[in-house]
Image: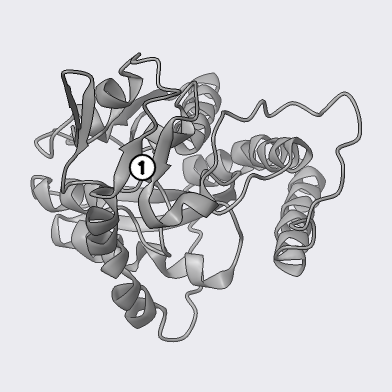
Amino acid sequence: MKAVICYFSGTGNTRKVVNEYVDVLTGRGVEAEACDIEKSSGGIDFGNCDFVGFAYPIWAFNAPKIVLDFAKALKKSKETVRSFIIKTSGEPVRLNDASSVKLTKLLKKKNFEVTNEYHYCMPYNIIFRHSETMAHKMWKAAKDIIPVDCEELLNGEERKIKKVAFGGILTGVLRIQQWGGRFNGKYYKVYDDVCVHCNKCVKNCPVSNISVKDSKFTFGKRCLMCMRCAFECPKNAIKIGFFEKWKVNGEYSFTPPTRPEPPTKHDNYCKKAYDRYFENIEERLKNYAEKE
């Protein structure tokens, strides 16, 4: 059995989840591999795959433009390809369920039938910084449930996520973020007094939107607002335009902190939604254990 998971990851959360999928599937005897959309084209031949995954981070309740463009560029398969979607976001609100509507339609045109969808909460790289405690809790929950989700895929069990009413319309309107990102990206800047000119931002931009000449940085019109440049900057030297107050800098450890973290104003943010998310995972794990 063979599986390929095509993914885009802004700052590593989606890649982390996809790698876990590959490890679990490989452990179950599947020839599984991850395919980075940034380094690939839509000309991939999936003819010998038993199933194909498409993974992305949710931005403004949508799949990123780079993922939609990849789907548009796919070759139409002669035979129906069983497919599944993996999505990650910082919060488990219901509108995120509709983030795959456009992608699913594009895939259907290329004869990729989406039978399963899976959504995992991972810590924010914009808006605010989740606590290390919450980041660890999110990752542990994902690691715990991914083997169950992989088992569903291997057993041919379908899992569809129920979309909210008018979700496709709402997410369609919110795709204005893709234009807004390009507009806002022109207002990114580098703080020269702290920049060490490592050029990490230039090298790692997924759309080559950042250039440097004579030590001066220029941000073009192709910004995805993936946050990679600002999130991974070792000196926190990048201003992210009009969203500077929402900037998050620095990787998460995903390990439990050695001492209690002080309370923050975000501790009750989407609390009911998070509680439902973790409770649902616990319930699925319990049901799975009872079947064993």
- The residue under label 1 is which amino acid type? Gly
Location of the C terminus by quadrant is: top right
Asked whether, in this view, residue 165 is left or right of residue 175, the answer is: right
Asked whether, in this view, residue 227 is left or right of residue 113, the answer is: right
The residue sitting at 31% across, 49% down in the picture is 82
Q: In x, y percent, where is residue 7?
A: 34, 38
Q: In x, y percent, where is residue 214?
A: 16, 18
Does 29 sit above or below residue 191?
Answer: above
Q: Which SS class for mark 1?
A: strand
The residue sitting at 48% across, 26% down in the picture is 19
**Does the rendering let one see residue 234?**
yes
Image quadrant where residue 183 sits: bottom left
Does 229 sit above or below residue 272?
Answer: above
Asked whether, in this view, residue 236 is left or right of residue 197, the answer is: right
Render colour scheme: one colour
Residue nearest the observer in this picture, 106 or 91 = 91
